[in-house]
């Protein structure tokens, strides 16, 4: 049976969130520069063809971020933040096989840094992305922000709902459609036909 990681997973770091531990990467400098692999097995959603694509996207972003220059006196303490990311799923990934993340340093500019990342299994590309990082504050005086802040109480409300459902399951002694595995929570909802 194949192993989901190339290297034995490191111990869970209690200073990191469960999600950070799951998505942690290991640099494979012995194989080549800018090559990374998953530290832990990635999640395969029940009934899905392949592993959870969001985890692959997150790990590609993390791999690219590892190659972006950190603030230093050489770059005037510039901080580069993700500006855009174009993603393409090529093949279904297998959670039982390690993934190699190959980062290509496309461009090192004063205001923008560009990377491409390929996620590969068994020598085949399963996912590819091109990322652009922008120097913080280089957008000029007027900026456009997208999105809204999460409304107050939403996170607390979700925690309360999940706890109530878990309590009901414990009292009734049977599953109620809520599954928790690692940092992921899955809830099966009934299907409603719209009119």
Image (cartoon, helix red, strand yellow):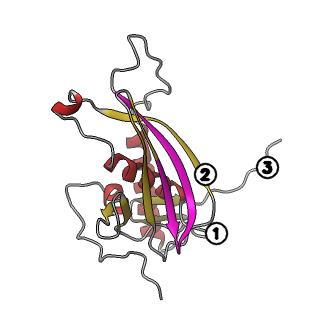
Q: Closer to the N terminus: mark 1 or mark 3?
A: 1
Report the residue marked by disc 3.
193
Q: Which residues are magenta?
A: 116-135
> What separation in Å lies between label 2 and label 1 (alpha carbons)?
16 Å
Is 157 a magenta residue? no
* 31, 18: nearer the viewer: 31
Q: Name which residue lies at 32% across and 58% down.
A: 18
Secondary structure under tag 2 reads: strand
Residue depth check, mark 1 versus mark 3: number of the one nearer the observer: 1
Is 129 a magenta residue? yes
Q: Name which residue lies at 30% across and 62% down.
A: 27
Residue depth check, mark 2 versus mark 1: number of the one nearer the observer: 2
Q: Position of residue 19 (x, y in %)?
A: 36, 56
Q: Give the numbered dot on residue 49.
A: 1
Q: Name which residue lies at 42% across and 69% down.
A: 170
102 relative to 46, above or below: above
Q: Quadrant of the C terminus?
A: top right
Count of numbered badges drawn on the protein: 3
Q: Main secondary structure of the magenta part?
A: strand
Q: Position of residue 59 (x, y in %)?
A: 42, 55
Q: Name which residue lies at 63% across and 70% down.
A: 47
Quadrant in the rendering for residue 152: top left
> What separation in Å lies between label 3 and label 2 (alpha carbons)?
32 Å
Report the residue marked by disc 2.
88
Q: Closer to the N terminus: mark 2 or mark 1?
A: 1
Q: Position of residue 61 (x, y in %)?
A: 42, 48
Q: Give the numbered dot on residue 61.
A: none
Q: Position of residue 174 (x, y in %)?
A: 51, 73
49 relative to 135, above or below: below
Q: Closer to the N terminus: mark 3 or mark 2?
A: 2
């Amino acid at each position: 049976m194949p192993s989901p990681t190339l290297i034995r997973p490191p111990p869970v770091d209690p200073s990191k969130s469960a999600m950070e531990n799951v998505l942690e990467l290991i640099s494979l400098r012995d194989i080549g520069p800018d090559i990374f692999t998953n530290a832990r097995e990635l999640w395969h959603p029940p009934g899905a063809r392949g592993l959870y694509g969001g985890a692959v996207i997150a790990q590609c972003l993390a791999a690219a971020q590892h190659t972006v220059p950190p603030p230093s006196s050489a770059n005037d303490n510039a901080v580069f933040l993700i500006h855009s990311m174009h993603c393409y799923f090529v093949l279904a990934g297998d959670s039982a096989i390690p993934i190699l993340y190959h980062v290509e340093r496309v461009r090192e500019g004063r205001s923008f840094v560009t990377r491409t990342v390929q996620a590969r299994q068994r020598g085949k590309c399963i996912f590819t992305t091109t990322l652009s990082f922008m120097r913080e504050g280089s957008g000029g005086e007027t900026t456009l922000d997208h999105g809204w802040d999460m409304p107050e109480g939403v996170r607390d409300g979700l925690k309360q709902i999940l706890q109530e459902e878990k309590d009901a399951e414990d009292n009734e002694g049977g599953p109620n459609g809520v599954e928790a595995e690692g940092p992921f929570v899955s809830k099966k909802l009934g299907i409603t036909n719209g009119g």
